[in-house]
Image (cartoon, rainbow, N blue to C red):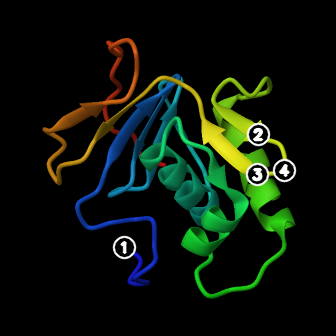
Amino acid sequence: MNSTPQSTISEAGIAGIFADAVLDDRTLELVVDGIGSELERKPLEVLIYLLRHAGEVCTKDELLASVWSGRILSETVLTKCIGRLREVLGDRDQEIIKTAYGFGYRLVARSELNLSPFHNRHISISDQAITHRVGPYGV
């Protein structure tokens, strides 16, 4: 766990189910199409932030401030993270992460968050229940 106060990763943890992917921020495991996926820490933190704000446009500034707290970076770093996420998620047509040109990014895929430390309390943020669940895989 990251000890930085501004980190997007929390002690309580979330499990996010979206598109054909499952992300557990406590274990940093990302499963896409039933296969464990390798993803670096910063793209994972960007994904966690987008999941927590699913459906909302997250500005580039708020993503940079949240994931790279206290550091001054160009937007290129964020653009590369989003590109890496799209590559791992197979999101060539922006059906999962949509660019809000000139503003930021929005997670547009149907998604469900589970916010409890033991993943037993669900908050659905989709218009349709997700019936497919995948067990934990090592990354």
Q: Position of residue 108 (x, y in %)?
A: 59, 29
In this rendered view, identify the residue nearer to me: 130 or 101.
Answer: 101
- Residue 73 appears in which quarter of the rendering? bottom right
Q: Which residue is mark 4?
A: 102
Q: Mark 1 or mark 3: which comes first in sequence?
A: 1
Labels 3, 2: front one: 3
**Point 45% across, 78% down: residue:** 6
- Residue 59 appears in which quarter of the rendering? bottom right
Q: Position of residue 90 (x, y in %)?
A: 70, 28
> Identity of the amino acid at label 4?
Gly
Q: Which residue is mark 1?
A: 1
Q: Mark 4 or mark 1: which comes first in sequence?
A: 1
In this rendered view, identify the residue nearer to me: 82 or 57.
Answer: 57
Q: Which residue is mark 2?
A: 99
Taking the image as shown, residue 69 lies to the left or right of residue 28, namely right
Give the CA distance from mark 2 to mark 1.
29 Å
Placement of 127 over or under 108, stated as above or below: above
> Identity of the amino acid at label 1?
Met
Q: Which residue is mark 3?
A: 103
Q: Secondary structure at mark 3?
A: loop
Graded by Cα atoms within 10 Å as few (under 14), some (14 to 19) or many (20 or more), the crowding at tag 2 reads some
> Identity of the amino acid at label 3?
Phe
Labels 2, 4: front one: 4
